[in-house]
Image: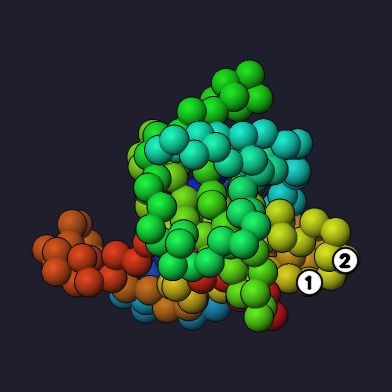
Amino acid sequence: AEMCGNGTRVFAHWLRSRGLVDEDKFTIGTRAGAKLVTVHSCDAHAAEVTVEMGPAEVIGVSTASMAGEKYAGLGVDMGNPHLAAVLPGLEAKELAAKTLEKPVIDDAFFPDGVNVELVTPLCDGHVHMRVFERGVGETRSCGTGVVASAAVHAQGRGEEQTSVRNVDKLTHTLDDGSFLRTNDKKAVKDGGSDDQQDHANNNQRSHELAFL
């Protein structure tokens, strides 16, 4: 992938907590360019990190089909490609019941493939989102996908700042055309995790986003 918000955050945590960098603010290079990160606090197992994600560029309208349903949305360039589809009238329970599978997309519009987000309309300051990532499948968390979803909801709303929160307490802030991505404390383990039951118990199928 050209860019991974979660990967950048975790890498920043690793570098700072292992003493491989000496300052709390530094730059990480990605295939989508340099990303400024700030490690607000950390130890060997947890951290609070902000990643400057860069501007979200809306590139036009396209569609994707999954499990016999066709979804229209906005293409968003976060350094990696997204199609964020806000589905009118869709509620969280209905979103959770949808089948996500490898989408049929417009290859001319997305020649490198695309991550597809299905997003509920804004209701009481919240939206929900599920994502199918290209080459992977549905994932529990996608930082660039949440930011792309926020960008689509921010279209025409006129706010200078928009905050978004998902089930893992990831906050995304749109400010002066750039997205800042802040994460609450997260556990990190060396090597693989053997706690499969914990993973299963926390395998939520949708992100809850709050516009504050």
> Residue 110 location in percent, x, y?
60, 27
Q: Is residue 146 visible?
A: no
CA gap, disc 1 and disc 2: 9 Å
Which element type, helix, strand or loop, lies under badge 2? loop
Which quarter of the picture shows residue 111? Answer: top right
> Residue 86 location in percent, x, y?
63, 54
Q: Is residue 57 visible?
A: yes
Which element type, helix, strand or loop, lies under badge 1? strand
- In the image shown, does 209 or 141 lie closer to the viewer? 209
Contact between marks 1 and 2 (CB within 8 A): the answer is: no
In the figure, 16 relative to 119: above or below? below
* Residue ID for mark 1: 161
Q: Residue at x 22, y 62 (%)?
A: 190
- In the image shown, does 97 or 111 lie closer to the viewer? 97
Q: Residue at x 43, y 72 (%)?
A: 168
In the figure, 16 relative to 112: above or below? below
- In the image shown, does 46 or 115 lie closer to the viewer? 115
> Residue 116 location in percent, x, y?
52, 43
> Residue 13 location in percent, x, y?
43, 66
Is 164 placed left or right of 102 in the picture? right
Is 1 placed left or right of 121 in the picture? left
What quarter of the picture does the C terminus occupy?
Answer: bottom right
Q: Amino acid at mark 1?
A: Gln
* Residue ID for mark 2: 158
Which quarter of the picture shows residue 162? Answer: bottom right
